[in-house]
Amino acid sequence: MTITSQNSSHEPTRDTRDLTLLIITPDFPDAEQRYIGSIYVKDQIEFLKPFFKKIIVICPVLFSCKIMPNDRYCIDYQYDNVSVYYPRCFFVPRIIPLLKYKRKLDLDFRAHAIMKCIQKHKIHFDLIHAHFTLPSAHCADLLKAKYKIPYVITANEDSGWLQEEIDLMDPRIKNAWINADQIMTINTYEIPKLKKYNFSTISVPYGFILNYSPLDMHTCRDILKIPRNAKILFTFGNLQKRKGLEYLIEAMDIIRKTRDDVQCYIGGKAEYEKSYETFIRKRVTELNLEDRVHFLGFMNGLDIPAWINACDLFVLPSLEEGFGIAQIEALACGKPVIAAKNSGSMDILTDPDVGILCERADSADFARGILRGLARKWDSDKIVQFSGKYRGDNVAQIVLGVYRDVIARKRRD
């Protein structure tokens, strides 16, 4: 099968409405959103789809005999002008510590599954957007070599993961970066690292959808059946070691010596790192915090705005975050953020009037940050205004500008 640009005979109008965009991503929500991995990719598509004839999403899924939730729930589906494919294949997930990263790459068949999916469904496309370097950008590099289709990368990796890829010095990774027509990092701290491989590297953040806006705190608390008069801390995400939740739990132990009115709610569950969830739940028990720290389990995306609006402070103790989209969702609801100094949080919380940065892996400093946040009167209107630059429609226009520049360069060539 030959893939050809559907607009190759047109003049470089810089428009995209007669083109097909291929998005390659290692995670994507199912149709019912029972699995919500990389939901920010789907959120971005909502703003991009009016500007394309068609959008194709290919997300390879680990064949696990339905043990893993994405294998259990993710089946091909279509909506509007978007088609989503989930080819099954074998690979060893990065966060499973059974093999070294290099060996995992050698046993990763996701790129092959993506290529096979394209051939099976006779998919034609004009531009590729790869989310994450592996497997997406590596596969995009192979597609560009075969079909001369340009590709852009969003390097979603957190700083630790990105450095791991750099240190590996694997040609599959290096070539994916070198041959990209544009690289977009999700924070400014990673730009110098990737510019060594490709000078066409810029920072483009995630954007939040318009579901995130201020709601009445007490109404949200009544709906969620949580105390009206307590001081509420809230955080959510996959329960994994890089999230640093043990430092939040230990901070709660420190805080109760000063304040008796603070309650902490943690949303999310462990997908791969079950032992970590066991560890933090045990830590709560060891510190006798069962009446102050509450685990909410899996959270439907529709419930999250209510939980954010119900809290006094959004807390993010993550040791590593490439961006941390939950922070901008909290800001969009007018909530201040207390975060550890990871690269994503340092890139977002640049104004002391929207949040407080604390030392990483430091329970005492995180407790101090929370206590300062609770003692301060915050201007929610100013926080919402600050979040405006992260609105999904605004970010989508930046991404579209990147696409149009890449397409124009391709046509000139």
Image (spheres, grey):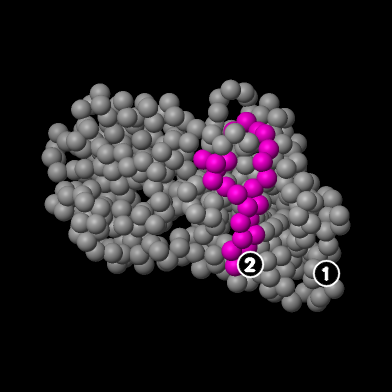
Q: Amino acid at mark 1?
A: Ser
Dot 2 corresponds to which residue?
81
Quadrant including the C terminus: bottom right
x 25%, y 37%: residue: 293
Please name whichever residue, 402 or 95, is drawn nearer the observer in this view of the structure. Answer: 95
Dot 2 surroundings within 10 Å: few (below 14), some, or many (20 or more)? few
* Eye-nearest disc, 1 or 2: 2
Q: Amino acid at mark 2?
A: Asn
x 25%, y 26%: residue: 285
Tell me if 177 is positioned left or right of 204 in this view.
right
Where in the figure is residue 410, as x and y percent of width and height? Answer: 79, 64
x 44%, y 40%: residue: 238
Q: Is residue 86 magenta?
A: yes
Point out the stretch of residues depicted in magenta: 69-93
Dot 1 surroundings within 10 Å: few (below 14), some, or many (20 or more)? few
- Report whether residue 168 is seen: no
Question: Could you say which quadrant of the image residue 370 lies in?
Answer: top left
Tell me if 335 is positioned left or right of 167 in this view.
left
Where in the figure is residue 92, as x and y percent of width and height? Answer: 62, 31
Question: Could you say which quadrant of the image residue 368 lies in?
Answer: top left
Please name whichever residue, 27 or 398, is drawn nearer the observer in this view of the structure. Answer: 27
Quadrant including the N terminus: bottom right
Element marked by disc 2: loop
x 70%, y 49%: residue: 198
Dot 1 corresponds to which residue?
8
**Residue 202 vertical placement versus 409 (above, below):** above
